Amino acid sequence: MAQATLRHDETGDVPVLGPGHTYGTVTDKISSIVLTEPPRPGWIFGFAVSFVLLLMFLFAVLNLLVRGIGIWGVNVPIGWGFDIVNFVWWIGIGHAGTLISAILLLLRQDWRTSINRFAEAMTLFAVSCAGLYPLLHLGRPWLFYWLLPYPNTMALWPQWRSPLIFDVFAVSTYATVSLLFWYVGLIPDLATLRDRAKSRIGKVIYGFLAMGWRGSARHWHRYRTAYLLLAGLATPLVVSVHTIVALDFTVGIIPGWHTTIFPPYFVAGAIYSGFAMVLTLSIPLRSYYGLKDFITDKHLDNMAKVMLVTGLIVTYGYLMEAFMAWYGGNPYEEFMILKDRPTGPYAHTWWLLLLCNCTIVQLFWFRYFRTHPIWLWVISIVINIGMWLERYVIVVTSLHADFLPSSWGMYHGTIWDYMTYYGSIGLFLTLLFLFIRVLPVISITEMRELVHEVHERGHARGGPAVTPGTAHP
Amino acid sequence: MSSESIYQTHTRDALPPSAVPRIYGLMAEFLQPDQVVQAAKAAYAAGYRQMDAFSPMPVEGLAEAIGFRRNRLPLVVLIGGLTGAVTALFLQWFSAVVHYPIIVGGRPFASWPAFIPVTFELTVLFAAFGAVFGLLALNGLPRPHHPVFNSPNFALASRSRFFLCIQANDRHFDLDKTEQFLRALNPREITVVEA
Amino acid sequence: MSQPTPPPAPGSSDRIAPLATARSLAMAIGPPALALCIILMLIPPTRTVIYPAYLVGYVFWFGIALGGASLTMLHHLTGGTWGLLIRRPLEAAALTIIPLAILFVPLLFGLDVLYPWARAGGADEPLIAHKAGYLNPTAFALRAAFYFGLWILLAWLINRGTDRQDQTSDRAPSRSLARISAPGLGLVFLTATFAAIDWMMSLEPDWYSSIYGAMLITGWGLATFAAMTLVAAALRSQPELRPVARPRVFQDLASLMLAFVMLWAYTSFMQYLIIWSGNLSEEIPWYLRRSRGGWQLFVAILILFHFLAPFLLLLMRDLKRRADWLLGFSAAILGLHLIDTIWLILPAQVRDPLSPQVGLPILQLLLVLVATAGIGGLCVSFFLDRLARRPLMPLHDPAVDGLAHLRDDETDDQTEAYPAPAPTPRA
């Protein structure tokens, strides 16, 4: 395995693939993590910690089912607490996967190749975590199907004007389409694993999932079309999902919620936190599994740039919200945005959110911070915290002090709120650790395409000609 | 694929069933993607039509080289999307205006602006179903076994090798002549694929 | 206008024949139309009808000037061959902010016609008094001076940088362009938002919407892409543009237009859905004014032809690759963008455009055309003059590297002059 010494070409750009790779080496390197390596101590430790958190989550949920959502801190006037904060936070994190896969594919950004599979998996797991919260919030989650439109004896239908019903459709569509997109991307890689698996059980399971894929040229042709069309569909879809989450707030006329900039800046914020999570996870992953040839410094740099852009959009959103609160002249809006949030009982969360989301990200103007993994990792965690706080500020402060001072109140998360929150991180990480062990974390197929492309370009420039097919017998 | 059954009946008519091993086709193995594209073009120019190429990743121009022209997948996706849009609009209009009209927030029964988000979601959902299930159906998958898997080196088609298979049911197929033809294309190896 | 002198030196503005023709046409239309506008502004009875019309025409061209600067900076940041084809038009369009800064001055004399807060006693209403510190003629003029100062500085910087880029194959000018582009783009976005609030939103000073700036900016982005695609399609047979005026690049431009059509529809619909759902008395009148008395016709046109038709047409790959088709399409988009601008501005003044009693609305719509032609004549001739002074394609942009790749992709394209792969002989 080559060291991560990256060859800089004449433009000073870092390449998106380390040197010396062939179709065979990328296949072997990526599939070996799944097929031949025994679990490493670090993996076992991480999995164990995550699993303990998951058990905590299950315990908290069991208690919730037995005793009801009164165990949470929510009550009149603050009916939405950690559950909705976490829902929005998780679904936001789930946005980077589809963004990386779909939008960057349409924009022909080849650096997406080595992170898209991983980011898509992250999307699926984050959306799974997100979807649980509204269901648990129902109080009687086993009656969730009441949300769906189906003819029933009560002749009741969903309330189509409510964004909460939009949410049911948006989140379930998003989860389904993300799963399909991910699976379609996996099919050829599953065929690779089927053909390379040593154990009988591996052959059978991967063979079953690969559905008999044999790499026929006709199949590839339709496959590419399907993949592009799915990307074209997923792009507006990903925008629509967080837009609808934003509508959950803006359609209500509560001060601090009813403002028109919410949809675009929620989408930007979602991408912001999603990229932060991709970095939080992929920086340790690439150093632990020696994937620095595939997830290069170029990827880190580009992701940091995307975070800078989305962070600035989020800041623009805050600014517009604050300006219009004053300009609009609505006293309730002005009180909420300009007085209660910066100086009220939740002021510390508001100031911390400005620090995390708007201030620290400005370091990404400097190349130094974009290319040093330790800095990137720390900043990405800070941004994850900041985006959680943003949702906390939006949900809790607006509800705690609305039009009538007699109906004001305070909210604090209980131990069960915290257990459910940290527990859902356990669920997320458990799924992610399992994914790393059983499926290729990087799309092997697309890495082969990248090898081909790098080879062609090297040829065109008269650079060192690597012949990608010949290195292995 | 219906073409394979044609092949089987054809050979059964022509030869006693036990006389020759049943042959699916001849498989040529290549190291580079451009080699297999050139080979496929040559085979097409030589009149071969019943053939297929196999590669570990999509290769630009390969499907066109073996004579693949019509890709009906976009049409399937379009139909899926339209179905979703019509379903959603009808569902919302029927339930909110016809079946159980109820005033909510002083809005009209047919609140078209509010119907748009759900319509959008269902359009995307059905279009995505069209893309994925259309892909599987047109490709004839899932299909657990296929004769090409009998080829000894074929496992490498999912790793690093490129294959061109000329099928025995092609009009011009002749075991010796086709093999000579393939040999001239400079493959790494040629194997006979049993049906 | 120009004498038929043939020397094709790169410094001369008459180097490229189609540009010279278009320029003399613009010069024939622009000054008389503008003179008519100025005269109408001076006559008391007509100044109430000319000022709104003038504002519409002004905002229409202003959006393209600002879009020129923004998209140039965007291209410095993202690269891509699409930018090579329209970079020079974009840079020239960015410079039209200079004539537009001068053309802004007449508006300052008509603030009382346009803006309720600038009228005598206008600030007595409590809601307006609340923001009188922001909405008053002095602050308005000072802010406008600041915006124009910044925009002119940026337009000058990107044009100077691109001249340097042309002179040397060194990457240093490209890098410094990228360095100013990142903060520059952010500043333009911010100042454009506040310009939209000042000049357009405050026409109805009791109304507010925080997405307004973003909505206007996406519309201007679309108009800019349409204008630039139109120029590129008209110049597609110029020898200088031969390497980039290719179907693949036109397809990219059309795809970017598609993205902006969707963004425009998204921001517009979101504002509508949120205000419609809230149904608050301080917000909904803005839409009520714009959906009755004939304005609903504009709404229908905008939904059908500013969103639905372009959206469907731009999904078709074959159309997007045809420069001749894109020429007409872009012109239509520009026309619809004018309708959009009218719909955003005029209902603040004109409540019943089709009401039979008053002939004024029809006159006002006609005056919009006069003002658009007047301001446009000057801007376009300035633009064409700047465009002709430089090579039509940037010479040493980093994106030029992508051209080799572009050629590979199009070997299967029958419309191009590249030879098809030689048929393999029968074995």
Image: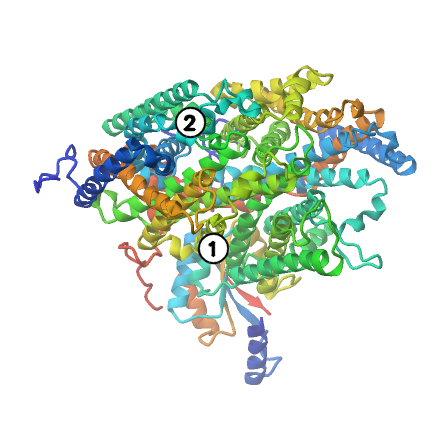
Please tell me which residue is depicted at 43% across the width and 52% down the height of the picture: C356
Q: Is residue A395 left or right of residue B123?
A: right
Mark 2 belongs to chain: C
Mark 1 belongs to chain: C
Return the residue nearer the eye: C249 or B94: B94
Q: Is residue A187 above or below residue A299?
A: below
Task: Measure the alpha-carbon separation of dots 2 and 1.
Answer: 31 Å
Please tell me which residue is depicted at 52% across the width and 53% down the height of the picture: A224
Return the residue nearer the eye: C381 or B64: C381
Residue B122 screen position, x and y as percent: 64, 53
Q: Is residue C85 visible?
A: yes
**Residue receiving disc 1:** C312
Residue B164 screen position, x and y as percent: 48, 61
Judging from the image, the colouring scheme is: rainbow
Please tell me which residue is depicted at 72% across the width and 52% down the height of the picture: A205
Label 1 element class: helix
Of the image marks 2 and 1, the number of the one nearer the N terminus: 2
Return the residue nearer the eye: C396 or A450: C396
Q: Amino acid at mark 2?
A: Val
Please tell me which residue is depicted at 79% across the width and 32% down the height of the picture: A79
Residue B127 screen position, x and y as percent: 59, 56
Residue C189 screen position, x and y as percent: 45, 28
**Residue receiving disc 2:** C188
Considering every residue shown, the one lying at the far right of the view is: A66
